[in-house]
Image (spheres, rainbow, N blue to C red):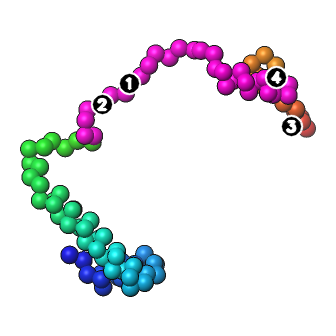
Amino acid sequence: MITPAQTAHLAHLARLELTPAEIAELTGQLGAILDYMAQLQSLDLGDVPPTAHAVDTANVLRPDQPHASALATALLQAAPAPEDRFFQVPQILREP
């Protein structure tokens, strides 16, 4: 169980200015979190192998197939000076 003094100390370390009402509320919330963590700590997981993910997954990839993009077509149509499939822009760099 966490005390209001410990909550106030944590708030001080985090550079938070809390009212007494906020400290009381957070003390209850932190206590609930710590109680839940204690429940998790009490579980017997000796037979459970360590895993990085809850379920075995592999990348599910679709075949890579080129296709026309309506967005690309709309962008090119909105461009002031498109050239083929490219945007033509004014030159901004000059050779010395």
Query: In the visual, does 90 lie left or right of 9?
Result: right
* Of the image marks 3 and 2, the number of the one nearer the N terminus: 2
Q: Quadrant of residue 73?
A: top right
Query: In the visual, does 68 lie left or right of 51?
Result: right
Residue 60: give x, y in percent of width and height: 38, 24
Q: Which residue is mark 3?
A: 93
Look at the image and give the residue range highlighted in magenta. Answer: 53-82
Separation (CA) of disc 3 from disc 1: 44 Å
Q: Is residue 27 magenta?
A: no
Name the mark nearer the viewer: 3 or 4: 4
* Of the image marks 4 and 2, the number of the one nearer the N terminus: 2
Question: Split into 4 quadrants, where in the image is the N terminus?
Answer: bottom left
Q: Which mark is residue 82?
A: 4
The main secondary structure of the magenta stretch is loop
* 76 to 38, vertically: above or below: above
* 16 to 68, vertically: above or below: below
At x 15%, y 41%, the residue is 49
* Of the image marks 4 and 1, the number of the one nearer the N terminus: 1
Separation (CA) of disc 4 from disc 1: 37 Å
Q: Which mark is residue 60?
A: 1
Q: Which residue is mark 2?
A: 57
Task: Name the element at disc 2.
Answer: loop
- Give the crowd class for mark 3: few <14, some 14-19, many >=20 residues within 10 Å: few
At x 37%, y 27%, the residue is 59
